[in-house]
Image (cartoon, grey):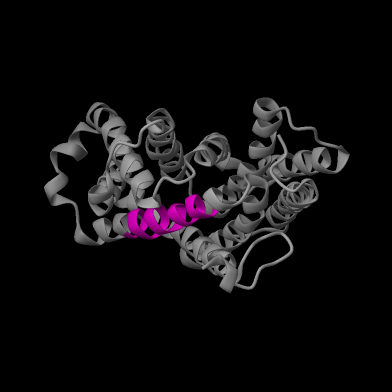
Amino acid sequence: MRDSQSITPGGLTTKDFAIATAMNVLWGLNIVAAKMAVDLIAPVTAALLRQAIVLLVCITALRIIRGKMLALTALGLLSGCAFYVAVNLSLAISDNVSALAIAGQLGVPFSLILAVIVFRERIRWPRIAGILLSFAGVVLLVFDPAAANEIPGIALTAIASAIWACCSLIQRSLRGVPVLTIYAWVGFWGTAGLLPIALHWEPATMRDLGSIPLAALAWVAFSAIGSTVAGQGAMSWLLQRHPVNLVTPLTLAAPVVSVVVAAFWFGTPVTWLMAAGGGIAMLGVSIVALRSASRTNLDGGEKR
């Protein structure tokens, strides 16, 4: 029960922080699983198999929710289909995935920009500066020889971050909908949307689905169950209970875990320029997230 938890001034409980910690670890580790999956299979087919597993795991929770189907459909097509097309293509064409992890931090400033556009939220110079620093840190990667060849992948990751920001706003309208039901629909629409794309773009891989190695399927299964069902499910659970601006600071550790894990697993270099870009981007994201959380607490709710 919420009243039995230790509650912080911002309204977050120890249970919330424990769930957020697990979420960050799963998302951080997922960069290895996702990269291995797209290398061993094909990017869109790997995404399709991931969403099919999500649907299989959550299918018993698939049901019509009156008044929420438009939001569930939009979330499913964006989060289950468009997001993974962008993410998996970026991983497939990139070698230095640590650079992609840094670019993935743009989800937080994109969320604020959307809040300004959609909810007419007013922002002052500290958060404007945070947005500019976030983008400046990612742009700095372009001048790093170790990451300069990853510009197409970084651009796709930025697109995926914008899609993620849209999804975070949609999830706020799904209060009261069980998390498993949300991700049953994400799996359903993700599978439905990715199937024709995979058949069109990767017909050879789709014909040879039966010959995919078990090791490759294990990487996909980790992404599906660990990152999507458990990780994104945790994010959805938190967003149903707290404003977006209070939850987004809890995601700040994920890109740090991703950079460290990717550098260790793949042996990709983390140069001083990449570290500087990542630090600047993280500083900007932290300013945006923490200032937004502070403003939410002062206003007593989500500022709109």
- Give the image location of residue 162, x and y in percent: 57, 35
Q: For this rendering, which residue is in front, 208 or 184?
A: 184
Inspect the magenta stretch and tell me whether residue 245 lies in it. no
Image side of residue 176 versus residue 165, left or right: left
Q: Residue at x 33, y 40 (%)?
A: 185
Q: Quadrant of residue 197?
A: top left
Give the total number of marks visible in the rendering.
Answer: 0
Q: Is residue 91 left or right of residue 292?
A: left
Of 278 and 17, nearer the camera is: 17
226 within the magenta span: yes
Q: Position of residue 302 (x, y in %)?
A: 69, 42
The residue positioned 30% from the left and 33% from the top of the image is 194
The quadrant of the picture occupied by the C terminus is top right
The quadrant holding residue 244 is top right
| Span of residues in magenta | 222-238
Q: Is residue 133 left or right of residue 6?
A: right
Q: Residue at x 30, y 36 (%)?
A: 64
Question: x, y (%) of residue 108?
Answer: 65, 44
Magenta part mainly helix, strand or loop?
helix
> What residue is drawn where x is 63% and y is 47%?
243
As displayed, is residue 225 above or below residue 7? above
Task: Name the foreground residue: 94 vs 281.
Answer: 281
